[in-house]
Amino acid sequence: MGWIAAILSMFIVTGALAQSALPPTPAGKVLAELLEAFNSGDAAKAEAFDRAYRPSDPIAGMAVLRAQTGGFELVKVETSDATALTAILREKAGDRFARLQLSLSDGSEHKLTGFRLDPVAPPAGLGPKRLSLTEALAALVKRQDEATVADSFSGAVLVARDGKVVLEKAWGLADRERSLPVTVDTRFRIGSMNKMFTAVAILQLVEAGRLGLDDPVGKHLSDYPDKDIARKVTVRHLLTHTGGTGDIFGPEFDRNRLKLKAVADYIALYGTRAPLFAPGTTQRYSNYGFILLGALIEKVSGVSYDDYVEKNVFEPSGMTSTGSLPESETVPGRATGYLNEGGRLAPNTATLPWRGTPAGGGYSTVGDLWRFVDALQTGRLISKNMLDQATSTQVQMFGLGFAVVGEGNWKGFGHNGGAPGMSGDLHVFPKLGYVLVSLSNLDPPASTRPLEFIEARLPEMP
């Protein structure tokens, strides 16, 4: 795994620490130079480091990553010799810790032969302290104020406990060209969070006896082009990303982005593809799988996907600011998304699909997403038994269309959404009564950071 990919996948934890010292060895010298080059944000220093030690998998040009992490600091060295070193690092802009394993070639000119970062829990004594609810919320507001000043966050956050909103606050700009501020009612593009609405719609039809979780696609889409998918891929496979149905993004999507206006258009473009693997044998996240779920909803219900979720998901939940209207239509209060282009923020307009789909791309507010959870938990959308199935682990980290994470009191469910210029997260912890929502019009992980921060500090007791 490249070290850049490893950094991006690190688990979030929290703590406070003082920076440690590196040993006076060749390995220690190289790590010191790497941290200095990366942390400086100076492209010339990064390029010089790459020429000296790391011509492949370079650190040069990583302005976006550095902006996300703030750089890294050394916590402690665990093992060390002349040409190898294992150490614990923490990112400066957040609370991530990782174990770094570095090795050098022998000889007079040392080159990096190994560089690996793996997520770790905080070292002893450096974990977070649980605060009172009031203290935790105040700490979150302070952190978000600072992140907004640093231009690493613009968006809104909602925290609720036991059915009551205890914080709903907005930061930053929804439209930088017009200097329009974000409000708690700003509509943000939510990416893959739409998958939860699709899952609920499917489960409603299952409970109504109009679909079966183990129905193959072809039972309802009799003219589906690829016969292996039609015969072997089931509704359950699609909900758990185990159908091998693949993605929709890539060169074909880029060429046809503005022509893909309906679910049928996606099937016409991608429907001849065979499964990537034998359905049910492994798991691979599939946007196209949720397009197929949308097609099933349309076939079984007899109405468009958007009309079905509007009437059967949004209206019963009181979600008046959620939808998937085309990008060509003016949607009051919809934020402009901003992607990071080499350190410069630019509108993400040229990356957007024609409209939101069953796989993602719609828009919502933090309040509407909280209302969605309330409708789920009070049985207004699906039964409690079905909700329990949907939010229990079926395969790895997924239930039926919902992500399932954590353990003990902090076992929860929800979904995130991320693409250039959009970032959203919903975390629900039923045992503790918490619902946490964060939406942003910046690149991931903008929305993730505030929820990770508050989760580490919220009290577990009343």
Image (cartoon, rainbow, N blue to C red):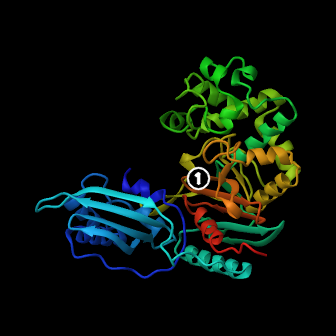
Q: Is residue 48 above or below residue 138?
A: above
In the displayed image of the protein, which residue is found farthest to the left?
108
- Quick one: 135 or 298, which is closer to the camera? 135
- Quick one: 462 or 333, which is closer to the camera? 462
Does any portion of residue 345 appear in the rendered image?
Answer: yes
Q: x, y percentage for residue 27? A: 24, 67
Q: x, y percentage for residue 259? A: 61, 33
Q: Secondary structure at mark 1?
A: strand
Does any portion of residue 71 appear in the rendered image?
Answer: no
Q: Is residue 362 above or below residue 107?
A: above
Q: x, y percentage for residue 321? A: 79, 55
- Quick one: 321 or 229, which is closer to the camera? 229
Q: Report whether 174 appears left or right of 54.
A: right
| Residue drawn where x is 12% and y is 60% of the image | 107
Q: x, y percentage for residue 62? A: 38, 60
| Residue drawn where x is 36% and y is 68% of the image | 87
Choose top left, top right, bottom left or bottom right for residue 279: top right
Q: Report whether 120 appears left or right of 322.
A: left
Q: Mark 1: which amino acid? A: Gly
Choose top left, top right, bottom left or bottom right for residue 312: top right
| Residue drawn where x is 55% and y is 77% of the image | 149
Q: Quickly name the residue at label 1.
A: 418
Classed neighbour count for the residue bearing mark 1: other residues with Cα under 10 Å, few (<14), some (14–19), many (≥20): many
Q: Which part of the image, by quadrant, shows the C terminus?
A: bottom right
Question: Number of marks in the image?
Answer: 1
